[in-house]
Image (cartoon, grey):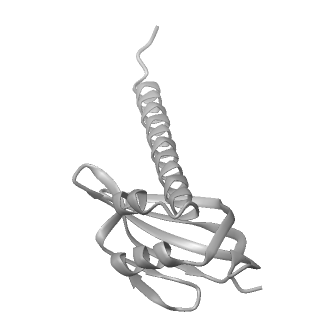
Amino acid sequence: MKFRPWLVATIFTLTATVAAVQQKSDSASKFVALEAKWNDAYKRSDIGAMNSLITDDFIITVEDGATYSKAGYIAHLATTTEHVEVAEITDVQVRVHGDVAVVTGAYYERGTSKGKPYEYRDRFTDVWVGVENKWRILASHYSIPTK
């Protein structure tokens, strides 16, 4: 059998590409799971889980343009008159650059507020950072999509 350097290079390139795709897929799965945990904590108004998921300098911008710090957001969750029945994320895209990840997607929420039904359809962007060997949310932004 004749040595073919191009074949070795092709095999090496394919192996590296498969490894990169696998790593990207594993990374995306990790952030989809973290987003599900964050979404579930919100749905249940689980203050302890929220505290563990967001950084101390967290900021969120909600649909009406209001912003909340970590303390403000936690206080809002603790005193809300909303009961979330459904909170779902779809169309999730993950981009990881070192110890920063940006997650975008679609968000759907349905429930009651002060006894009256409500329904939201939003787009979101969450920025996760690696802090003390743990991923936490630094910033979150929700907006109402144009029709």
The residue that appears at 44% across and 41% down in the rendered structure is 23
Vertical placement of 90 versus 14: above or below?
below
In the image, 13 versus 137, the foreground residue is 137
Task: Compare residues 93 and 7 and report the one nearer the observer.
Answer: 93
Q: Specify the farthest residue to the top.
A: 1
Q: Is residue 131 left or right of residue 87?
A: left
91 shown above or below 118: above
Q: Is 8 left, or right, of 57 in this rendering?
A: right
In the foreground, 143 or 53: 53
Left or right of 112 on screen, residue 138? left
Most distant residue in the bottom direction: 65
Q: Residue furthest left?
A: 132
Q: Where does residue 83 sit, x and y in percent of width and height?
A: 65, 70
How many numbered tags mark residues here? 0
Q: Quadrant of the C terminus?
A: bottom right
Identify whether 16 is placed above or below 57.
above
Q: Residue at x 47, y 46 (%)?
A: 30
In percent of width and height, residue 33 lies at 51, 48
Residue 58 x, y percent position in the rendering: 34, 74
Q: Quadrant of residue 116?
A: bottom right
Question: Residue at 42% of width from left, 36% of height from top?
Answer: 16
Image spot of residue 49 (x, y percent): 41, 56
Q: Quadrant of residue 54?
A: bottom left
